[in-house]
Image (tube, grey):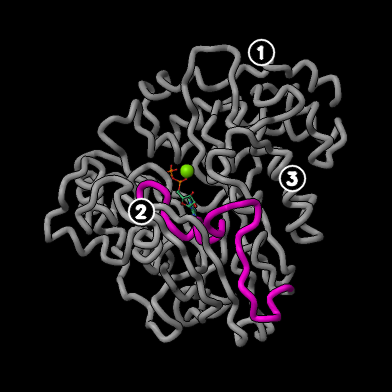
Amino acid sequence: MVERTVFIHLPGEPAAVPAGRLTLVEQGLQVQASRFAYGRRYVARANAVPVDPVSLDLASATNDGECVPIAGLALFGALRDATPDAWGRRVIENRLRAPPNGLPESVYLDHAGPHRAGALDVRESPSSPPVGGMLPDIVDLQHLLEAASRIDAGEPVPAHLQDLFSGGPSMGGARPKAVVRVENGEWIAKFPTSNDPFDVPTVEHATLELARKAGLDVPRTRLESLADGRRVMLIERFDRVSLAHGIGRRHMVSALTLLALHERQSADSSYAQIVDALARYGVSGWIAGDRRELFARMVFNILVSNDDDHLRNHAFLYDAPGRGWRLSPLYDVVPKPQVASERMLHLAVGPQGRLARLDNALAGAGRFGLLPPAAARIIDRVVCAVRPWRDAFEALGVPARDCDRIASAFRRPADIGMREVARKL
Ligand SMILES: Nc1ncnc2c1ncn2[C@@H]1O[C@H](COP(=O)(O)OP(=O)(O)O)[C@@H](O)[C@H]1O
Ligand SMILES: [Mg+2]
């Protein structure tokens, strides 16, 4: 049995406070069960934030009792989100000289470091100080990429590069990445890998900028060219905020957590379920706007064949004034070239399930609270923004060769039900 104190950075505060005690029951490497008890002083704070939206309601935490995760989950979703799922694990294993996924879950939880996703931190006891760890600067990108490539290849990182990841591995997702300081903010650097089929950082950058043109809510991004010609995409962290003294954190959970699901259930889920979770945990006054945004993202994913739209690629941020959860800005959208004309997204779109067609999206729009004309206008807006993708991509530095390689990802609206949509306009 492992006992830890969960800390949280409350809104506007640069230092974390203890929120409660986490108990993990582990068998081998796996967590079998977990329990959490809020601290009495934490619950008494006027600005207390729920550690987990679905399993750890503050209102029911008054009797100092222990809670267990709902829906038979072994670990609270919010703590699962505070632990890296893939890349960050490779960084920890590299440092501890362990094989892939070869460490107990509590070790990953302990070593995710102070720059992990969201506002949670996990420490030994309520009096444990935060782990230090400076973030590397953007000028270190070339060295960071070298260290990341070693980690990706499962090779030891040379001593002179070790310090670059001393602040902890921080983020999940599969691709090599690092958190870097840019001016006074925190950004995620996403690196190229040796087996990329095209220049993924440049294409991801261009895709996110195209999404911005389609009216989607996209964090600031930039593309850095290294001396050796390789490129790195940078995206500003939306779970960090600049404060007068230091950097504050925003509590963030994945859609997997807000839906109270296990990882393996992601592929059986739908955008409509995210809408339902928003109705339950969203912020009144913002829910309708968040649903429209989610609908537009789904349409964008259909048009660029981004079928990596799983439940960890949608996130929610805690909104302190509204005491609820709001859809985070967009991230991790990359066109996937393919030959088949019948394509699927990861999540179900409408009545025809995961079928990636505009008429399927239109037919399912009612679940998003959208009448057909309103849904058709959103689809039309996104279609118009995506149509000139090639000019936009070339202007953003995607080489013509790579545009050719990804061209099959972009759908012709007429082939995927635009006629049906146009009838409602
Ligand atoms: N701009 C951002 N701000 C805060 N967190 C982010 C941002 N972009 C990504 N993340 C978090 O980092 C994780 C990994 O990033 P992602 O872009 O999905 O990488 P990958 O392509 O490897 O899946 C995401 O699941 C999300 O939790
Ligand atoms: Mg991802």
**Residue 229 x %, y %:** 24, 39
Sequence-wise, the earlier of marks 2 and 3 is 2
| Residue designated by label 3 | 275
**Residue 103 x %, y %:** 31, 54
Residue type at mark 3 is Val
- Give the structural element (helix, strand or loop) at label 1: helix
Residue shown at 31% from the left, 39% from the top: 192
Is label 2 or label 3 in front? 2
Residue 415 tag number: 1
Quadrant of the rendering where the C terminus is positioned:
top right
Q: Is 117 part of what is drawn in magenta?
A: no
Q: Is residue 186 placed above or below 211 in the rendered structure?
A: below
CA–CA distance in space, label 1 to label 3 = 27 Å
State the extent of the magenta-drawn residues as a range. Answer: 60-87
Is label 1 or label 2 in front? 2
- Give the structural element (helix, strand or loop) at label 2: loop
Give the main secondary structure of the magenta stretch: loop
Q: Nearer the viewer, residue 411 or 393?
A: 411
Residue type at mark 2 is Gly
Q: Callout 3 environment at 10 Å: few (<14), some (14 to 19), or many (20+)?
A: many
Residue shown at 47% from the left, 31% from the top: 393
**Residue 266 x %, y %:** 58, 39
Q: Callout 1 environment at 10 Å: few (<14), some (14 to 19), or many (20+)?
A: few
Contact between labelled residues 3 and 1, with CB atoms less than 8 Å apart: no
CA–CA distance in space, label 1 to label 2 = 51 Å
Residue shown at 27% from the left, 61% from the top: 165
Q: Nearer the viewer, residue 250 or 125?
A: 125
Mark 3 vs ligand 1: CB below 8 Å: no
Picture quarter containing residue 231?
A: top left
Residue 28 tag number: 2
Q: Is 61 part of what is drawn in magenta?
A: yes
